[in-house]
Amino acid sequence: MSQHSTTTPSLTGTVYLVGAGPGDAELITVKGLNLLRCAGAVVYDALVNPVLLDETPPAAERIYAGKRAGNHAMRQEEINEVLRAKAHEHAVVVRLKGGDPFVFGRGGEEMAYLRAAGVAVEVVPGISSAIGAAAAAGVPVTHRAVSGSFAVVAGYQSGDAPGQPRWDALALIDTVVVMMGLRNAGHIARSLIGAGRAAETPAMAVFAATLPTQQVVIATLDTLEAAVAVMDLDAPATIVVGDVVNLADPAAYVRREMWALPIAPALFGVSTPVR
């Protein structure tokens, strides 16, 4: 247990674990946006749209805690402690994460650490790329006539992860969504095929989902690795495997040209009270 542990919350601010969504700044929730606008400190990740940082007050602290493969601005233990410390300095601390805080975002670990340290925590869910990336390509992860189940799995296993995915079980799921799996696309495909999934199963990779630079690669399970390599695109990317890929919107296959819409100055007139 942390040396800061206590049975009752101390007189601190609240840390809000806020999901920023899959990329497009407008996909953050109204509550998340309002919290940014009254935050004293924001600790943000690499995949957060930088436009959202412009919504913070001029005096707010902006602390980068991004993690990319082989390049971590902070260790997780350091992030935990920064959040605890800032809660003693500010009424509202926003921990801004790409997607949803509880879907491969380590939000659960941060929540447990802060609660043990007597710091109030509130979770503000966000649109996970596990669903949002597929939707941006016109693909529903479930469809009454095609897919009655879906699973989300990490394609990259960190050193302290509990183990490899159960590919034998995943091969039986109608739709499999793989996050952080671009570099291991070939291994993922071979693992599913080896576990019994048909090699000709439709598969796709969505790059920079919901952003103007979004691109979609459509392939089959056995050709996914080669198709992704030809595109020579960088992460972030979300892989989707299953017959639902056949429903992909052809207009999403190519780079999308979009116009930038301003973040609403006062969405629905809602404001979030400072605690």
Image (cartoon, rainbow, N blue to C red):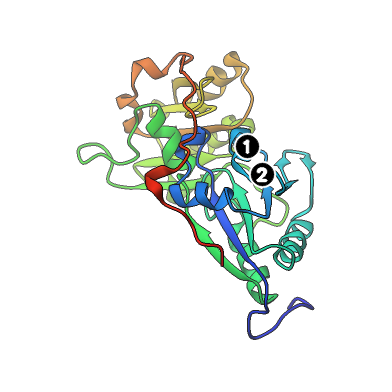
Q: Disc 2 residue type?
A: Asp
Q: Is residue 88 above or below residue 193?
A: below
**Residue 110 point in image, percent of width and height:** 65, 62
Q: Disc 1 residue type?
A: Asp
The residue located at (35%, 39%) in the rendering is 141
Q: Nearer the viewer, residue 140 or 74?
A: 74
The residue located at (27%, 46%) in the rendering is 148
Q: Mark 1 or mark 2, which has the lower sequence index?
A: 2
- How busy is the neighbourhood of tag 1: few (under 14 within 10 Å), some, or many (20 plus)? few
Residue bearing mark 2: 45
How many labels, in total?
2
Residue 54: mark: 1
Tell me if I can see residue 172 in this picture: no
The residue located at (38%, 27%) in the rendering is 202
> Which-is-in-front pick, marks 1 and 2?
1
Q: Quadrant of residue 241?
A: top left
Distance CA(mark 1)–CA(mark 2): 15 Å
